[in-house]
Image (cartoon, rainbow, N blue to C red):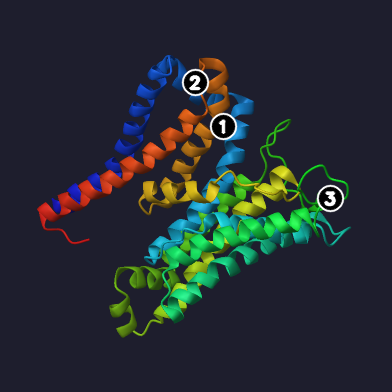
Amino acid sequence: MRDENSRLLLILSPIVAIASALLVGAILISLAGANPVKAYTVLFSESLANYYGFANTLTKTAPLLLAGLGVQVALKAAQFNIGGEGQIYMGGLGSTLVGLSLQGWPAWIHVPLALLGGFLFGAVWGGIPGYLKAVRGVNEVITTLLLNYIAINLVAYLVNEPLQEPNAPSAYSRLIFESAWLPIILPKTQAHAGIWVGIIAAGIVWVVLARSPLGYQIEAVGLNPIAARYAGMSVKRTIIIVMALAGGLAGLAGSSEVMGLKHRLFEQFSPGYGYDAIAIAFLSRGNIAGIVATSLFFGAIRSGANAMQRGAGVPVTVVYAIQGLTVLFIAISFAIERGFKKGLGVRG
């Protein structure tokens, strides 16, 4: 009975958090002098039911999904990867460098190599705090957060100096070769194969975490590192591996933006996907299918924000308020869940 109640709470808490955020958002919309029903109808119909709007939703979902997976992989080992934003920038940089090289190579080789470049650059950026945590005991929250600023400013320097397009009016690199572009999956839109990269990555992550010895080791370290060490597992190595994997997945989010959407590296090219990924991972409660669904939800409200402003007269900032409220309510749900489990005498 206790297990059933815990599972029910696990399913209901993110749903209640999202519903509560939308309810408070409706109040904000009303205060702005607009009709909440009309606003939400425009928001979701334009982002999910409209062909071009849905394409835009897929475009925004791809980096959110990949970065969200990066946060979740780290959480499985009880590591808090707050560095998704920086890892996205490094992944974008890695794919750009490969995309600006290998001229004349066929797309079926160039695209995978550019994706690999993004993954490796992100993995290195995630592995640094993993190493510092495992070997030096430095808190990964601090190091991943600080590395965000280093990555963002490093990319800003590169697109303003050595990588900048000659005579460019603003800070961006040269176009990567077309052989490194991700293909368009919906004609006459910007929807690209980055969403398939995200879905494939989600499947691989699920298999690794749920069906492999490495996944068992990651979970054991996350649940009880002392017991894992006594069982012969290398806790330090696991932490480094899991943080590198987390960084690599977030790096692919940057690859998706560069190779699929922008085709060049821009200063400030991520609108905060790495930070949204934290909320996505926590809302999904460790469920990979939940990460896919939550990423689609966040992608939809980002995609429909401008349509809601045009069609219902609601400022775009309300959408960002809804995202923030979602995070707030999921945090409240965690506190309620802990109290509920404590009352039932359930550990964890």
- Give the mark nearest the N terminus, 2 or 3: 3
Residue 249 in view of the camera: no
- Could you tell me the amino acid type at mark 3? Glu
Closer mark to the observer between disc 2 and disc 1: 2
Residue beneath the point at 36% across and 65% down: 78
Q: Are marks 2 and 3 in contact (CB under 8 Å)?
A: no
Q: Quadrant of the C terminus?
A: bottom left
Left or right of residue 207, residue 251 in this image? right
Q: Are marks 2 and 1 in contact (CB under 8 Å)?
A: no
The image shows residue 62 at horizontal and vertical percentages of: 58, 45
For residue 165, the mark is: 3
- Give the mark nearest the N terminus, 3 or 1: 3
- Place residue 153 in its image quadrant: bottom right
User: In the rendered image, which residue does mark 1 sit on?
Assistant: 303
Tag 3 secondary structure: loop
Mark pair 2, 3: CA separation = 37 Å
Tag 1 secondary structure: helix
Mark pair 3, 1: CA separation = 29 Å
Q: Is 27 in front, or is 59? A: 27
- For label 3, count other residues whose C-alpha is less than 10 Å away and answer few (under 14), some (14-19) or many (20+): some
On screen, residue 25 above or below 15: above
- Could you tell me the amino acid type at mark 2? Val
Residue beneath the point at 57% across and 26% down: 306
- For label 2, count other residues whose C-alpha is less than 10 Å away and answer few (under 14), some (14-19) or many (20+): many
Closer mark to the observer between disc 3 and disc 1: 3
User: In the rendered image, which residue does mark 2 sit on?
Assistant: 314
Residue 268 in view of the camera: yes
Q: Is 133 in front, or is 230? A: 133
- Give the mark nearest the N terminus, 2 or 1: 1
The image shows residue 249 at horizontal and vertical percentages of: 56, 59
Residue beneath the point at 42% across and 14% down: 35
